[in-house]
Image (cartoon, helix red, strand yellow):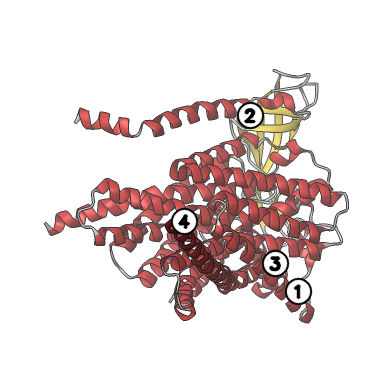
Amino acid sequence: MTLMALLGNITVFFCSVYLMKYNDPYKIVFVDIIFMCLLTLLYQNGVNVKTISALIAVLAVSLVLIKITKYIAGAGNIGGYNEFEMYEDNLMNLSVNIHLNIHDVAISMLVLGVTGALIDIAVAVTSSMHEVWVNNRNISEDNLYKTGMTLGKSILGSTINTMWFACIGEFLLMFLMFRKYQYSFPHLINSKAFFDIICNIFLSAAGCCVIVPVSAFVFVKILKYQQKKEA
Amino acid sequence: MGNSILEQIKKRKFIIIFTLIYVIVSVGIVKFVINDAFLYKQTVVKVTSQKKIGSYKQKSQNQKSEKYYTQRIKGIVQNGDLKGKKVKLVNDYSKSRVKTDKYVKGDYVFASVSKDDNTPGTVNGMKRDYIVCIIVLIFMYCMIMVSRTKGLLFIISSAVNISILYGALELYSRGTDILMLSYLMVIAFTCITLACISGINRATIISIISVLSVVTLTGIIYKIVLMYTDAPDYIMMEYVTGPNDLEKLFFAEILMGCLGAVMDIAVSVSETSCALIKQNANLALSDFKASMKALGQDVMGTMINIMFYSYFCSSVPMVIIQMKNKYKMNYIFRFDLPFELTRFLTGSISIVLTIPVTAFVAWIILYYRNKHKNSSTITVQNKELQTEDIGSEE
């Protein structure tokens, strides 16, 4: 089941990359995120309160993340060739006239990259809250919210750690390049290569932080709504 | 109603005070970084207005033409001899903006400016330091808000890790072997991160041992596979134009890439096994194996998923540029993606390896410790008996 969902995700990912040449990257990525949620949440974990609240939380956070990334990373002109790629031999014979704004591609890819982690955290939070709620139906909203946050904390550290170390290898090579060309530290922190990596790590990590309270909140609200409906 | 709001405020006193202080401090920092042009030798210009003054079409190798725009930028010099002077700059940008950037009002740019007013200067790059600063501050706020002390510890550990990385590169440029350095770095990263995240206790020691052995195993597997297959074309690797130990560098990158995921899984497996054995000291090996298997199936899929996305997404813009140039998909897979693919696959292998290795290490350490503890409790009981005997004699 897990493997099937993983394979489905990978297929959807490559299809969306293929389609991206023709269309607006934001639309494609949003459709891709919805597909991912459907596969990992509803197919893998079944349709219930947990997954539906996780779905809502993930969609909301990824929309907000697209907006914020567009604003902040767009201000720093994320994407495109960085200082080193500009002069690389094998890229010289590639045409850069691609009729597609590369900034949009970079931003939408940043958000898509973090969605997997968002789904993971959201499901963990809502299912732990559901577990607590099933065992103790009279638990107050505040306490329920707190359980979600406690679990979120423990899972957050490990998820961010994974992303951080996946990027640190890239950091290594980038630092080496800067040393090789004898760039100074001011040059480093103003460069596009550094900015791309920083955006990737820290904005996605911030997204992971935000999903914890959001999914806990959505779960509490949905549970309340359901109870009202039953009563 | 008013009462409940007051109560809410009282309850969240810490959050409100912290947020206020944080916002004030970070606004101060960002203000400083925006105005730190005096630290730079290059001329920094603040863009006050920009205007599109013309466009032209340019054809390229693939016979596709695209619109290029010329913009005239008016700005104020922020540092150097010409400080405070109003200058004009010219900049060209294309519609897809792969090699060129568009600048808007409020940006800070590095520019080469001439002293006479008639010839406009050109833009050399963008000043991004304050945006980097804002992003890091946002991240730190979210992290501390959601996970308090743990978040703070994580931030500290990653700062230490980055400085270790920087120091190691200093050593590398003086001629130390990268392979040895990277293994030392792996050990340092593992110890620092794990000690920061979960404190110094038995579970941490178990995870450190198993992380190091998994990383070694992954390295050995990678080397064995490399012996029987052709090495990928390292020239196509990102960020590389020359050094002759590319193979070793890539190896170091692989080792570090899998470290994060391995650490997480090792921590969760070792903590669970400690809890299991604490609950039931006489746990049978088969039961232990079964529960470890269940745990492994839980965490494995999501971790591999996260790894997949964090590796592949960053290379998508490049793939799209190549696809737009009518490169075949199999060409891209052969020359551009092998590095991402290799990193992803080795990472997945190491994730899968972590679960049995950590369970094994945990079992051995906890089992022997339990045995030792049992025998020591028996001796303690004997001693107590002896003292009681002595007391009764008196």
According to the picture, the residue beneath numbered tag 3 turns out to be: B339
Residue B343 lies, in percent from the top left, at 66, 67
Q: Report the front residue among B349 and A74.
A: B349
Q: Are marks 3 and 1 in contact (CB under 8 Å)?
A: no
According to the picture, the residue beneath numbered tag 2 turns out to be: B33
Q: Nearer the viewer, mark 2 or mark 1?
A: 1
Q: Nearer the viewer, mark 2 or mark 4?
A: 4
Q: Chain of mark 3?
A: B
Residue B218 lies, in percent from the top left, at 68, 71
Specify whether disc 4 shares its chain with disc 1.
no
Task: Provide the secondary structure element on which disc 3 rests.
Answer: helix
According to the picture, the residue beneath numbered tag 1 turns out to be: B223
Crowd rating for badge 2 (residues with CA inside 10 Å; few <14, some 14–19, many 20+): some
Rounded to the nearest angstrom, the CA distance separating label 2 from label 1 is 46 Å
Rounded to the nearest angstrom, the CA distance separating label 3 from label 4 is 29 Å
Going from N to C along the chain, the mark reached first, 2 or 1, is: 2
Specify whether disc 2 shares its chain with disc 3.
yes
Name which residue type carries label 2: Val
Crowd rating for badge 1 (residues with CA inside 10 Å; few <14, some 14–19, many 20+): few
Name which residue type carries label 4: Ile
Q: How many marks?
A: 4
